[in-house]
Image (cartoon, helix red, strand yellow):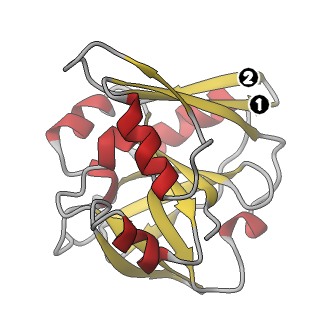
């Protein structure tokens, strides 16, 4: 099985305000607005080169309320509090061609596999039952694209690129084990934190305005 980074998810309480902040911070222009009708969210994307992008996502005030919890914890008070002032990194998504097998391998920890579509894009993605990212976003959601074109192929190349990411967790061995089970073991550097002190992640990007950091 081959698993690789697909995209990062940056949450914001208001897509217009979050877009303005991100475009100023990265010195790059985001895509047009896209909508996820099934999840009641909308987003804008930023190319990070071939096969990779950054997604800025928010609850769509004009969208319908989904029958399940929204992805990436957008319905939870914890996430809503964190993204109230400015966009925050909510997690990342890993691409695979064996989403059912990998979900089974992790005993359903990643949640159910849900079919989604937007325009001519179609995909399957794991969403935990409570909507909250696994291990506060350190463990990726899995995605399997069921269409011939990847979203990054339709994004203008603004010169932004992912550099590396790191995280802190009270039990780094647990994160390492799960990443190994997902066949993406070298994705991030994880350092230990004191017990019960929480989990954080940080990603670094090369942009036209220099190296920028996004944090959870």
> Is residue 158 left or right of 149 when viewed as pictured?
right
The N terminus lies in quadrant:
bottom right
> Is residue 210 left or right of 20 when viewed as pictured?
right
Q: Please, what secondary structure does the residue beneath circle 1 have?
A: strand
Q: Which residue is mark 1?
A: 206
Q: Residue at x 38, y 43 (%)?
A: 137
Q: Please, what secondary structure does the residue beneath circle 2 have?
A: strand
**Is residue 115 positioned above or below 63 on the image?**
below
**Is residue 107 positioned above or below 76 on the image?**
below
Q: Quadrant of residue 168?
A: top left
How many discs appear? 2
Q: Are marks 1 and 2 in contact (CB under 8 Å)?
A: yes
Image coords of residue 11 (percent x, y): 41, 43
Question: Quick one: label 2, few (<14), some, or many (20+) residues within 10 Å?
Answer: some
Q: Residue at x 44, y 77 (%)?
A: 101
How far is disc 1 from disc 2 in space, using C-alphas?
A: 4 Å
Q: Residue at x 66, y 53 (%)?
A: 53
Image coords of residue 116 (percent x, y): 42, 80
Q: Can residue 92 be spotted in the picture? A: no
Q: Which residue is mark 2?
A: 211
Q: Disc 1 or 2, which lies upstream in sequence?
A: 1
């Amino acid at each position: 099985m081959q698993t690789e980074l697909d995209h990062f998810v940056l949450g914001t309480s208001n897509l217009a305000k979050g877009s303005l902040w991100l475009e100023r911070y990265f010195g790059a222009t985001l895509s047009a607005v896209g909508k996820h009708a099934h999840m009641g969210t909308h987003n804008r994307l930023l190319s990070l080169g071939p096969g990779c992008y950054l997604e800025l996502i928010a609850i769509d005030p004009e969208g319908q309320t989904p029958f399940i919890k929204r992805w990436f914890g957008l319905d939870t008070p914890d996430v809503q509090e964190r993204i109230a002032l400015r966009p925050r990194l909510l997690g990342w998504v890993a691409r695979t061609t064996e989403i059912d097998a990998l979900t089974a391998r992790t005993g359903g920890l990643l949640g159910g596999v849900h079919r989604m579509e937007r325009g001519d894009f179609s995909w399957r993605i794991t969403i935990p039952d409570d909507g909250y990212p696994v291990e506060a976003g350190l463990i990726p959601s899995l995605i399997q694209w069921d269409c011939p074109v990847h979203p990054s192929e339709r994004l203008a190349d603004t010169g932004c690129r992912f550099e590396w990411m790191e995280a802190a967790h009270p039990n780094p061995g647990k994160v390492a084990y799960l990443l190994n089970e997902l066949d993406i073991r070298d994705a991030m550097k994880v350092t230990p934190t004191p017990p019960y002190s929480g989990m954080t992640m940080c990603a670094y990007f090369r942009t036209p305005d220099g190296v920028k950091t996004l944090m959870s």
